[in-house]
Image: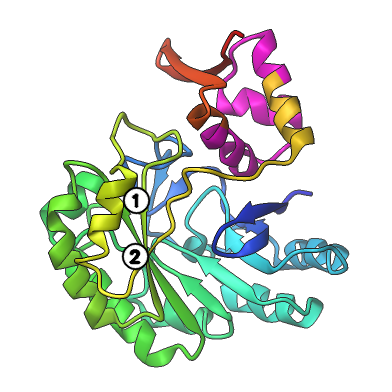
Amino acid sequence: MKFLFGPVPSRRLGLSLGVDLLPFKTCTLDCTYCQLGRTTCLTLDRERRVPPEGVLAEIRSRSEDEFDYLTLAGSGEPLLHQGLDEIIRGAREAIDRPVAVLTNGTLFFRQDVRQEVMDADLIVPSLDAATQTTFERVNRPHPDLLIEEIIEGLVRLREEFEGEIWLEVMLVKDINDSEATLIAEAAERIDPDRVQLNTVVRPPAEPVQPLSQAEMEEMLEIFSGAEVIAEWERDLSKRTEVLIIDLLSRRPCTLEELEELSGLHRNEILKYLEVLEGEERISRLRYGGLLYFQAQEG
């Protein structure tokens, strides 16, 4: 498959069949915590980046598979693909499962972008800051992006969109956790159906630190009615787990090497790496400016 990956297990979405519409790390942000590494194409330019007929042909070929959501996500910011409406409508005709859009939410200040996602069932945008200073520290945005415009775009999305909106807040220790109250106030303005709190549990682009489970639970006192979705534990497919451990037992590998050797999509691999690292069955090391993973002995 060129555009689809998974299904992968998701605490929020059950089994999610992913749709990847962007070249790797084409994004409006360069987030410090991103598990995919540094953004290589920081842009606000929307283009028809993939042929919709090819994407829809793959979706139709998987229509009988077992999954709970078809999810537009992947290796870049899906809102940068111009023509999302064509893919969303075609997907809803091809499958009888809901369509979700996982996005950083930065482009919803544009009316044309909001209009293209109106036929989705679920939109999951992010909001990690309430001031421009913190926005630039945690998300390292394209220089033309302003957090006030982004928040206003999310408010307008809520006014216009009839489906569900689940707002995700990624909390990074000593970077944006001190701004939690302001972010919570912005979330109240946006008025999503759910507010979901996350922290850095996957290997991040930079050496940033997560909040502890106890600290995340304390955040529930600030974000009224929110839920913690950080996944400190995850059930794994035994077959995939054995494959990854076997590859890393032979030699340390980068994420890109694991993708090539296993034939799995990097988003799927990352879900396994985060759990295996938490269980101390693998570790990471940096060499020559690259991040490697290796199996622990014993």
Give the CA separation, mark 2 to mark 1.
Answer: 9 Å
Question: Residue 22, can we see it?
Answer: yes
Q: Give the side of residue 292 with respect to residue 150, left or right.
A: right
Residue tagged by mark 2? 106
Q: Residues within 10 Å of mark 2 (few under 14, many from 20)?
A: many
Q: Position of residue 239 (x, y in %)?
A: 79, 34
Q: Is residue 116 magenta?
A: no
Q: Residue at x 66, y 57 (%)?
A: 18
Q: Which mark is residue 29?
A: 1
Task: Say if 250 sits above or below 211 in the image.
Answer: above
Give the residue type at disc 1: Leu
Q: Position of residue 46 (x, y in %)?
A: 46, 63
Q: Nearer the viewer, residue 28 or 205?
A: 205
Colour style of the rendered protein structure: rainbow
Q: Nearer the viewer, residue 242 or 107?
A: 242
Region rendered in magenta: 246-275
Is the residue under label 1 in contact with that under label 2 (CB below 8 Å)? Answer: yes
Task: Say if 195 sits above or below 163 in the image.
Answer: above
